Amino acid sequence: MSALRFSSRFNPMLSNTILVQTKSLLFSFSSFSSSVRKPCKTLCCSTNSLLHTNGGTSNSSPLSGLEDELVGYIFGKKKATEVAHLVWRHVLHKGDIVIDATCGNGYDTVAMLKMVADESGHGRVYGIDIQTEALENTSSLLDETVTQKEKELVKLFPICHSRMDEVLPENTAVRLVAFNLGYLPGGDKGIITTSKTTLLALEASKKMLILGGLISLVVYVGHPGGREELETVEAFASGLCVDGWICCKFQMLNRPLAPVLVFIFKR
Ligand SMILES: C[S@@+](CC[C@H](N)C(=O)[O-])C[C@H]1O[C@@H](n2cnc3c(N)ncnc32)[C@H](O)[C@@H]1O
């Protein structure tokens, strides 16, 4: 049996351990007081309301309805990026404003554009990448996959994502900031996201996000600096207050190089 651990972190108010049977999977939901908590290596949630509410309604859970997709990820049937897209779809509405903080080859940009573009020309994707090559690839993919009208809803910026607040109009209400960290597939592996600028970008994202919004990260740990970057992301998410944020991580214990998903929901 694949045992998953749902761990409530940093909330000394929660002290119970609940076992939840979902289909054929046994999810172990545990919470720790701050004095006994240890880093959780599989699936860590900052509250007890992500998939199964504990006294509340299931509608209040930001991942409710996505159980099958998450189980698909656990059994290797869904890629991390696919799961990220499903979670975005769950959170986004037509007309929303979103940021792709690492455009790369444009697949994420196209996916989020399809989710937010509406008939009347609302919705906006701000796409950022430090490499012009990546933005050219993104632009080409947009040409191939969306209409000209839809493409006009995308604004691309060749800057570091730590400067995202410089290119967005003041007080823009952003529903999603997505990071797909690492290097450009098929590009220069030496040009890579770093802990320092990722942390600055997370701080900037936090300020721009509206209530109900999401910071989504796919973190790769197989390259030099990847693990350190994951630790930085974890430390950032772990430090957010439970009342304002729900922070969780999906990580496979026995696939140590598999990408790690981190979702940071603003309540
Ligand atoms: C894994 S790729 C992104 C994949 C992409 N989202 C897609 O759908 O194809 C990571 C991208 O992050 C970009 N990057 C690296 N450091 C950056 C930074 N400081 N600011 C913005 N982008 C950065 C790289 O140039 C690379 O294109």
Image (spheres, rainbow, N blue to C red):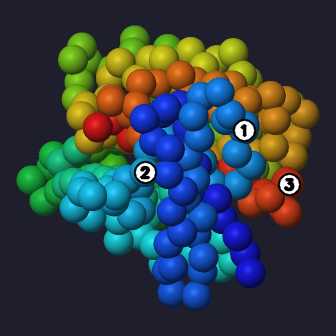
- Determine whether, in the image, residue 85 is placed left or right of residue 136: left
Residue 161, located in which quarter of the rendered image?
top right
The CA distance from mark 1 to mark 3 is 15 Å
Horizontally, residue 124 falls left or right of residue 180, namely left
Q: Residues within 10 Å of mark 1 (few under 14, many from 20)?
A: few
Q: Whole-Å distance between the Cαs marked 2 and 3?
A: 26 Å
Residue type, label 3: Pro
Depth order, front residue of 235/149: 235
Q: Residues within 10 Å of mark 2 (few under 14, many from 20)?
A: many
In the foreground, 138 or 230: 230
Instruction: From the image, tell me which residue sits under label 2.
Output: 48
- Residue 31 lies, in percent from the top left, at 55, 46
The single residue placed furthest to the left in the displayed view is 120
Name the outermost residue toward the right.
Answer: 224
Q: Please report whichever mark, 2 or 3, sits nearer to the chain's N-terminal start.
A: 2
Q: Is residue 200 above or below residue 146?
A: above
Q: Amino acid at mark 1?
A: Pro
Q: Mark 2 or 3, which is nearer the eye?
A: 2
> 242 above or below 143?
above
Q: CA distance from mark 2 to mark 1?
A: 17 Å
Circle 2 SS class: loop
* Residue at mark 3: 256
Upstream in the sequence, badge 2 or badge 1?
1
